[in-house]
Amino acid sequence: MDEPLAIKEEESVAGSFENAGSFFIGIFNPTVYRCPCCRSVYKVILGPGDIFLGEGRRNCSHCHKGFRDRSKEWPVLTSLEQFFYLFPTVVCGWVLFALIICGLLAWSEGALGTIRIALLTASFFVIPLMAWFAVRGYQIARSIHRFHLDRSAKAA
Ligand SMILES: [Zn+2]
């Protein structure tokens, strides 16, 4: 039984920002996934990264039709896909932004400011990143769990 494949669109909300670097592209060019039957949006991902975890199919919450939603479980992703799932454009942009800010501060404050810079970096940049990896880790753990449940259900 082959269900229809979801519609995937790369929206350009702010095309004029496209030259402002990958950080802004990640924020303003979300990838939108729609139900193939009624076109209602069921998933929005920031940036061109098109990987999200799931069982590979779902039922539309509007028209209740089943379709393949383009999701995959963590164990079947390639290592490149796993890398981009953990480090999408937005996160790479964030890290780059943090490095530039720290570089500028270190340059303007001199050696004495190093501790202050370290504290600032920790609170301002590392905490959101830690939250990000905590959420991602949880999603990956759930995906692996679903994957093994599904396999044991099929084997039974
Ligand atoms: Zn639908």
Image (spheres, rainbow, N blue to C red):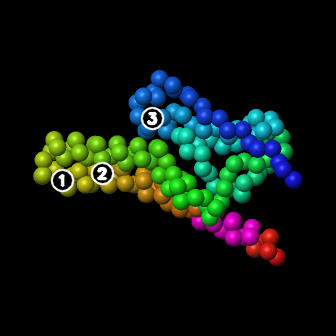
Measured along the vertical axis of the image, is residue 6 above or below residue 149? Answer: above
Report the residue that reaches farthest toward the top: 16
Callout 1: 10 Å neighbours few (<14), some, many (20+)? some
**How far apart are the two marked residues, 1 and 2, measured between alpha carbons?**
10 Å
Examine the structure image and report whether residue 18 is included in the region drawn in magenta.
Answer: no
SS at mark 2 in the image? helix
> Which percent across, then down, holds residue 51?
60, 50
Q: Is residue 131 left or right of residue 8?
A: left
The residue drawn where x is 26% and y is 46% is 102
> Which percent across, then down, holds residue 72?
66, 56
The reply to whether callout 1 and callout 2 are in contact (CB within 8 Å) is no
Magenta-tinted stretch: 141-151
Callout 3: 10 Å neighbours few (<14), some, many (20+)? some
Q: Amino acid at mark 2?
A: Thr
SS at mark 1 in the image? helix
The residue drawn where x is 78% and y is 38% is 36
Say whether disc 3 or disc 1 marks the residue closer to the N-terminus: 3
The dominant secondary structure in magenta is: helix
Examine the structure image and report whether residue 142 is included in the region drawn in magenta.
Answer: yes
The residue indicated by pointer 2 is 121
83, 114: nearer the viewer: 83
Return the mark for residue 24: 3
76, 56: nearer the viewer: 76
Callout 2: 10 Å neighbours few (<14), some, many (20+)? some
Quadrant of the displayed image that contains ligand 1: top right
The residue drawn where x is 65% and y is 35% is 9
The residue drawn where x is 46% and y is 44% is 90
Return the mark for residue 133: none
Q: Is residue 142 visible?
A: no
Q: Amino acid at mark 3?
A: Phe
Return the mark for residue 114: 1
